[in-house]
Image (cartoon, helix red, strand yellow):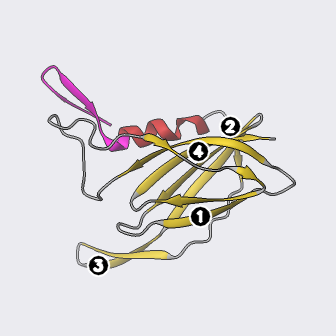
Amino acid sequence: MILTQDEKMLVTPTGYVYEMYAPHQGGASLHTVIESDDVTYTAAGTEQQVATVSGSASRMGKALFLTLTNAHATDAIEVTVDLLGGVQAAGGAARILSGEIHAHNTFDAPEMLAPRPYAIDATGASFVITLPPASVLAVEIALG
């Protein structure tokens, strides 16, 4: 999660993802259904598959916390978020961690990959979020 070298220290992308998911703690887990194609890749000479989009949701009071990942290395994915039970989104703020699939933080470039604000339009009972390739998105949505 962090790297150190003498007096230097940096946060790894894994450390940032951990921090981005932290708001789920203490929230009520919500049943989340994600329909997604699979990404096929080869690792250690074996062809494998993983869901292109994965995610989770939790609620704390009038706030919905949603985290989504796009595992595809080169393609952006549009995700439609449908809130059920008459719930309406009344705006939201998002942060994204995204970059070239092999990029990493180094002591020469300690913030090569760091979360940054990401514009979304989270209003109504349904809205669309575009996930860039190889990204992790954390969204806090105000519920009306």
Mark 4 closeness class: few <14, some 14–19, many ≥20 residues within 10 Å: many
The residues bearing labels 2 and 1 have C-alpha atoms spaced at a distance of 23 Å
Is 46 above or below relative to 130?
Answer: below
Q: Nearer the viewer, residue 28 or 91?
A: 91
Q: Which is in the foreground here, disc 3 or disc 1?
A: 1
Question: Label 2: which residue?
Answer: 27
Which residue matches tag 4? Answer: 139
- Mark 4 and mark 2: span between their CA atoms? 14 Å
Residue 79: mark in rendering: 1
- Residue at 43% across / 43% down in the picture? 17
Please name the amino acid that badge 2 sits on.
Gly
Between label 3 and label 2, give the one nearer the viewer.
2
Asked if labels 3 and 4 touch by Cβ distance under 8 angstroms, the answer is no
**2 in the magenta segment:** yes
Q: Earlier in the sequence, mark 4 or mark 3?
A: 3
In terms of secondary structure, where does tag 4 sit?
Answer: strand
Question: In the image, 33: left or right of 48?
Answer: right
Give, as a single range, the part of the protein colored magenta: 1-14
- Left or right of 107? Residue 134 is right
Residue type at mark 4 is: Val
Secondary element type, mark 3? strand
Side of 57 relative to 107 (left or right): right
